[in-house]
């Protein structure tokens, strides 16, 4: 019985290593050459057969979605680690910049799943975990009095997303232009005596917005 259990554990460990290799190989190739890379090239880079790839990911779309989930989970895990750090305000902005850095590096992947972002159960669950961790970091900073109390996580995500998108075209010229925009976001979120109109957006609002779709003539992109 012990030998059988040990063999099963080894098989699971081997399967997980193969899956990890495929995710890493695909992410690297997509970043290097775009999403047109063939599954055969991905399997070869990972050092596994095509059969192994298809057992883990029936289609390239499944593979892309799995990488997006993986990236969101990486950001979430980093946020959990930062919850134990000192200086709640600085910690929040470290998390914001690192999380958006991940998305910008894998921009094509996130854009490719934009239309199904919250319709895909695994992506939605990963994004919900990300938002919950963001909530905790934001609340911690608000409790410390370093972030205005009338903003919510979706406010910060939308604000930062807009800044990142606008600064993207300048990235090749001078990366510090994007850093300046992050500083402006920080300034906008500093404690203020003023009040904001309307209410805080929620994850449920984002889901409803995706269900309705973008206005005519626009392209929907993933938030956060």
Image: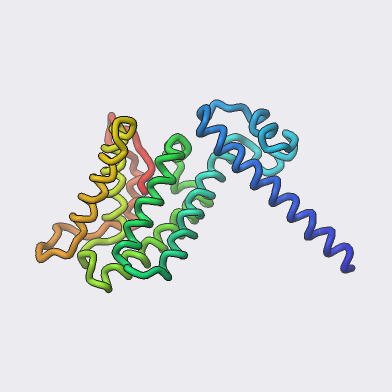
Q: Is residue 116 above or below residue 198?
A: above
The reply to whether residue 139 is in sight is no
- Residue drawn 67% across and 46% down? 19
Q: How many labels sit on residues? A: 0
Q: Quadrant of residue 210?
A: top left
Q: Is residue 30 left or right of residue 200?
A: right
Q: Is residue 132 above or below residue 106?
A: below
Q: Position of residue 27 (x, y in %)?
A: 55, 38
Q: Position of residue 38 (x, y in %)?
A: 62, 27
Q: Quadrant of residue 203?
A: bottom left
The N terminus sits in image quarter: bottom right
- Residue drawn 40% across and 51% down? 98
Q: Quadrant of residue 131?
A: bottom left
The reply to whether residue 199 is in sight is yes
Question: Outermost residue, left direction?
Answer: 194
In this view of the protein, which residue sits in the foreground, 112 or 81? 81
- Residue drawn 32% across and 34% down? 171
In this view of the protein, which residue sits in the foreground, 66 or 163? 163
Q: Position of residue 172 (x, y in %)?
A: 33, 31
- Residue drawn 19% across and 55% down? 187
Q: Position of residue 69 (x, y in %)?
A: 52, 49
Q: Is residue 199 above or below residue 58?
A: below
Q: How is the image coloured?
A: rainbow
Question: Outermost residue, bottom direction?
Answer: 143
């Amino acid at each position: 019985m012990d030998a059988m259990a040990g063999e099963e554990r080894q098989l699971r460990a081997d399967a997980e290593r193969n899956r990890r290799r495929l995710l890493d190989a695909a992410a690297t190739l997509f970043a290097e050459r775009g999403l047109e890379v063939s599954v055969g090239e991905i399997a070869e880079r990972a050092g596994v057969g095509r059969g192994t790839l298809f057992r883990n990911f029936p289609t390239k779309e499944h593979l892309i979605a799995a990488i997006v989930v993986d990236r969101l989970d990486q950001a979430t895990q980093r946020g959990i680690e930062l919850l134990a750090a000192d200086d709640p305000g600085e910690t929040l902005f470290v998390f914001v910049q690192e999380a958006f850095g991940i998305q910008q590096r894998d921009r094509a992947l996130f854009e490719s799943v934009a239309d199904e972002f919250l319709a895909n159960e695994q992506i939605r669950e990963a994004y919900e975990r990300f938002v919950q961790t963001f909530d905790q970091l934001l609340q911690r900073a608000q409790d410390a009095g370093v972030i205005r109390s009338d903003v919510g996580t979706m406010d910060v995500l939308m604000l930062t997303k807009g800044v990142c998108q606008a600064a993207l075209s300048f990235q090749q010229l001078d990366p510090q232009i994007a850093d300046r925009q992050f500083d402006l976001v920080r300034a906008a979120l500093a404690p203020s005596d003023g009040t904001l109109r309307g209410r805080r957006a929620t994850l449920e609002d984002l889901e409803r917005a995706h269900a309705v779709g973008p206005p005519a003539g626009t392209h929907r992109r993933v938030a956060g």
